[in-house]
Amino acid sequence: MEVLEFLGEVLKGIVRAISAHIFKRTVLEKEKTTLRRHKHKGGSQKQN
C-alpha cells in the first residue's frame, strides 16, 4: 500500500512540474510578443 501511495505522490509531482512548465512557457511567450518594439533612434539621421 505504501508503494502505491509513493507512486501517486511521484505522479502528482510530475504532473505539477509539467503543468507549471507549460504555464510559464505560454505566459513568457505572450510577454515576449508584446515587449518587442522598435528602439527609438536618437540624434540626427540622414534623409534620402
Image (tube, helix red, strand yellow):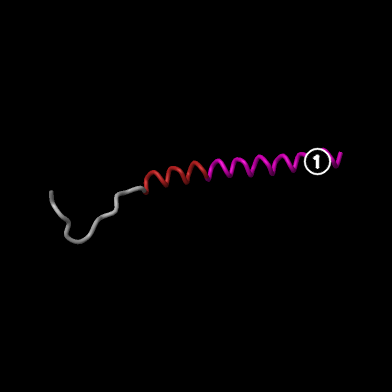
The number of numbered badges drawn on the structure is: 1
Residue at point 63%, 44% (across, down): 17
Task: Say which residue appears at 80% left-offset and 41% top-offset.
Answer: 5
Q: In this view, does 7 lie to the left or right of 47?
A: right
- Residue 6, picture quadrant: top right
Magenta segment, principal secondary structure?
Answer: helix
Residue 40 % position (x, y): 26, 55
Q: Which of 35 and 16 is in front in this view?
A: 35
From the viewer's perspective, is residue 44 above or below residue 14?
below
Residue 19 falls inside the magenta stretch: yes
Point out residue 2 in the picture as x, y percentages from the top left corner: 85, 42
Q: What stretch is highlighted in magenta?
A: 1-24
Using the image as rendered, state which of residue 7 and residue 48 is in the foreground.
Answer: 48
| Three-letter code for the amino acid on which mark 1 is drawn | Glu
Question: Which residue is drawn at the image coordinates 13% and 51% (left, top)?
Answer: 47
Residue topped by disc 1: 5
User: How far from the left and from the top, in percent, is residue 41?
Assistant: 24, 56
Residue in view at x 13 percent, y 48 percent: 48
* Residue 15 in magenta stretch: yes
Furthest toward the bottom, the residue is: 43
Quadrant occupied by the N terminus: top right
Q: Quadrant of residue 19?
A: top right
Q: Please state if 14 lies on the left or on the right of 25 as rendered.
A: right
- Judged left or right of residue 24, residue 17 is right
Under circle 1, the secondary element is: helix
Residue reaching furthest left?
Answer: 48
Dot 1: few (<14), some (14–19), or many (≥20) neighbours within 10 Å? few
Residue 32, above or below 43 = above
